[in-house]
Amino acid sequence: MRIEAFDATQHDRKEFESGNAKLDEYLQRHLSQGVKKGIVQAYVAVDDNGKVLGYYTLSAAHILHDDFPESVAKKLPRYPVPAALLGRMATDLKARQSGLHIGSKLLIHAMKQTLKAGSTLGVACIVVDAKPEAVGFYRRFEFLPLKQEDGLRLYLSVDTIRKMQR
Ligand SMILES: CC(C)(COP(=O)(O)OP(=O)(O)OC[C@H]1O[C@@H](n2cnc3c(N)ncnc32)[C@H](O)[C@@H]1OP(=O)(O)O)[C@@H](O)C(=O)NCCC(=O)NCCS
């Protein structure tokens, strides 16, 4: 299994099934346009035949100052904080049985890409609007809730990613 930038001409995604039909349809029908238009950048985990086992997207975003928990907000300037949005992420149901921990590997890859982006422009966090059933997955990686009432918008600071890498 390897992780690489999505290439609509190379990556076979016909049979991808994550258990979430919208995420499957996005990969199969809409992702290539999003990449072409520069709205998202996408990365896929693929097997030796180029079959997609998982994917995620990243885009530029920001987090409003007042959305951070008070203890964090008071240490930040009072304007929006630049972030990388993990817009979509899913792994194939069958591939999940493989024990390869594809979701974890993709998420760690996304963290590294966020650090990389931060070397060319300001990026302070990675943020995700988690599906309710996936909150536990992100919390395992130290993602923390922002102040949204539903508790589904989670973030991880670049500082924390750097500490995790040490
Ligand atoms: C969420 C998702 C991407 C995780 O991918 P995955 O390939 O199952 O992840 P991994 O195998 O690396 O799992 C790592 C660990 O997290 C756990 N985990 C996986 N999904 C979890 C979840 N939804 N909640 C809590 N823990 C979860 C695994 O059990 C595993 O634990 P272990 O190390 O003790 O075995 C995948 O389940 C998925 O595609 N779900 C459907 C779509 C979805 O909800 N996407 C998220 C959109 S925000």
Image: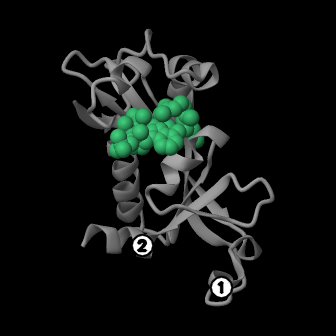
Q: Give left or right: position of 163 versus 23.
A: left
Name the amino acid, label 2.
Answer: Thr
Q: Secondary structure at mark 1?
A: helix
Q: Secondary structure at mark 2?
A: helix
For the view shown, which residue lies furthest in the left direction? Answer: 48
User: Which residue in the structure is indicated by mark 2?
Assistant: 160
* Quarter of the rendered image showing ligand 1: top left
Give the number of the disc on residue 71: 1
**In this picture, is 49 found above or below 134?**
above
Residue at image x 51%, y 71%? 124
**In this picture, is 36 found above or below 129?**
above
- Is any atom of residue 79 visible in this view? yes
Spatial CA distance of label 1 from label 2 is 16 Å
Number of residues whose C-alpha sits closer than 10 Å to that of mark 1, classed few (under 14), some (14–19) or many (20 or more): few
Residue at image x 62%, y 82%? 72
For the view shown, which residue lies furthest in the right direction? Answer: 149
- Is any atom of residue 40 visible in this view? no
Name the amino acid, label 1.
Answer: Ser
Number of residues whose C-alpha sits closer than 10 Å to that of mark 2, classed few (under 14), some (14–19) or many (20 or more): few
**In this picture, is 27 found above or below 105?**
above
Total numbered badges shown on the rendered structure = 2
Pick the front one: 148 or 35: 148
